[in-house]
Amino acid sequence: MKDRGGEPMGDAKATLHPSESACGGRQRPARLARAVLAGWTARGRDLREASDLADLLRSYSLTWHRRPLGRLRGALVGLGDEYHVVTNSALSTSEGRLVAAHELGHYLMHHRPQWLLCSAEAGTWERAADCFSREEDEAEEFARTLWAGVGGAIPAANCGRGA
């Protein structure tokens, strides 16, 4: 896989077909998560350690920040050509790591915040909301598959809803 600038990134061996772009078709988040996990664990790394998850994010040129975010659980923030994963510092350690993995899923599946680009034309907001919901489900499936692969306990709450 290549990052948004066209450079090779991380350990993911799976690639998404061009028709699998955001809201253009069904993503394969579980397959992608397994590929990321396989590449990472082949190097002897253990994502149960917070430091390894931070290293995994850095391998994709993502910086992980923990900040007070009120009711927001996390976000993938693009600033120019840089992307940052921000998780709520009020979350438990395991919840924060799962939310960070969820945001990584958004990044790897090239989800775009299309809801910011909506016009006032009829039906646009509904289509954007449907797209957002589908992308949240895909990122959650990615995060849960990644976490299940390392035997991590998955918090009962959805990692992405409200994020």
Image (tube, helix red, strand yellow):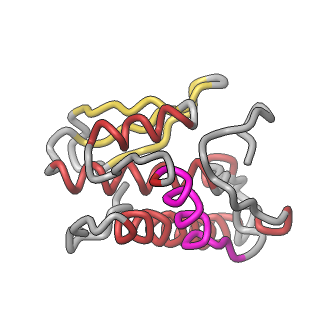
Q: From the viewer's perspective, is residue 91 above or below residue 14?
A: above
> Residue pushed farthest right?
18
Q: From the viewer's perspective, is residue 154 above or below residue 80?
A: below
Q: From the viewer's perspective, is residue 66 above or below residue 93?
A: above
Q: From the viewer's perspective, is residue 3 above or below residue 126?
A: above
For this view, does 152 lie left or right of residue 143? left
On the image, which quarter does residue 64 sit in? top left
Residue 126 at x, y = what percent? 62, 72
Magenta residue span: 26-40
Residue in the picture at 60% in, 47% down: 11
Is 38 contained in the magenta span?
yes
Tally of numbered tags: 0
Residue 77 at x, y = what percent? 50, 36
**Res 7 visible:** yes
Is 68 contained in the magenta span?
no
Residue 10 at x, y = what percent? 60, 41
On the image, which quarter does residue 15 sit in? bottom right
Say which quadrant the C terminus sits in: bottom left
Viewer-side residue, 120 vs 77: 77
Residue 53 at x, y = what percent? 37, 43
Q: Main secondary structure of the magenta part?
A: helix
For this view, does 140 lie left or right of residue 148? right
Residue in the picture at 64% in, 73% down: 28
Residue in the picture at 54% in, 35% down: 59
